[in-house]
Amino acid sequence: MTGRGSVLSACAAVTGLGEPEFASPPSCWLPGSSSAPAWACGQQASAALVRVIDGHLVLCRQQDRDRYGRIVAACRVGNTDLNRWMVSNGWAFAYRKYSRRYVSDESVARSAGREVWRGDVVPPWEWRRGRRLAGEDTGSRPATGQATGKCAIKGNISSSGRIYHVPGDRHYDRTRIDTARGER
């Protein structure tokens, strides 16, 4: 699969890594204790990836399909392995259940305290099993303006083409999706 980064669906899974959840509350807490402020690490991870791929040609090679039917792929922009970039910059976890390829990159990011590793964090596979940090609310209601379902990215169609919004974008909260028009 090849496409421009602004068009490529970020709802495809990437091989060998897991991103923080788009949960409410977030699955990351700043350093100190469980009473330190939570931050939207999943939304920030997605935004970081969008900044790297935006407008660039992205090449993804399908490796598999996950249990939800999503394509599991290894993706590149030029010579940059996006999967490795996400893990080594602290925006994603090496998902050891499926691959050991990015474990050393995760160790370096963790030691350096990069992004998700700058505080307390629950890996996504543990979050989905119900693990929470002490003091963290376990409510399942999405945050205001957050998309419901598996993918928090909102895509709508305007007269100028297809537009994608990620949580944290300026227009994300006010974007409304019309599924009858093919938006999601």
Image (cartoon, rainbow, N blue to C red):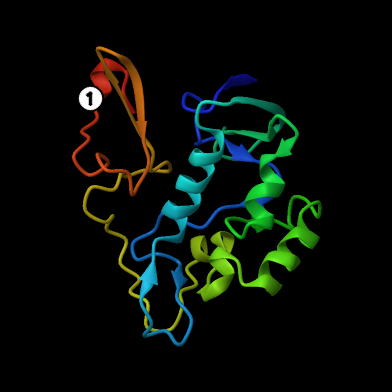
Q: Is residue 26 left or right of residue 180?
A: right
Q: Is residue 20 left or right of residue 1?
A: left
Decide: is 39 above or below 69.
Answer: below
Query: Which corner quadrant of the image does residue 152 belong to?
Result: top left
In front of the other: 5 or 157: 5
In front of the other: 18 or 80: 80
Query: Which corner quadrant of the image does residue 91 belong to?
Result: bottom right
At 39% from the left and 61% from the top, the residue drawn is: 40
Q: Secondary structure at mark 1?
A: loop
Numbered label tally: 1
Task: Point out residue 143 in the picture as x, y percentages from the top left corner.
Answer: 26, 56
Task: Point out residue 4 in the picture as x, y percentages from the top left corner.
Answer: 54, 22
Decide: is 159 above or below 112.
Answer: above
Residue flagged by tag 1: what amino acid is it? Asp
Location of the N terminus (image quadrant): top right
At 52% from the left and 76% from the top, the residue drawn is: 119
At 31% from the left and 23% from the top, the residue drawn is: 183
Q: Is residue 13 left or right of residue 133?
A: right
In front of the other: 54 or 142: 54
Query: Which corner quadrant of the image does residue 135 belong to?
Result: bottom left
Q: Mark 1 = which residue? A: 178
Location of the C terminus (image quadrant): top left
At 33% from the left and 49% from the top, the residue drawn is: 168
Task: Point out residue 147 in the picture as x, y percentages from the top left corner.
Answer: 31, 43
- Looking at the image, the residue that sits furthest to the top is 159
Decide: is 20 above or below 162.
Answer: below
Decide: is 152 above or below 41.
Answer: above
Task: Point out residue 8 in the picture as x, y percentages from the top left corner.
Answer: 52, 26
Mark 1 surroundings within 10 Å by alpha-carbon count, few (fewer than 14), some (14 through 19), many (20 or more): few
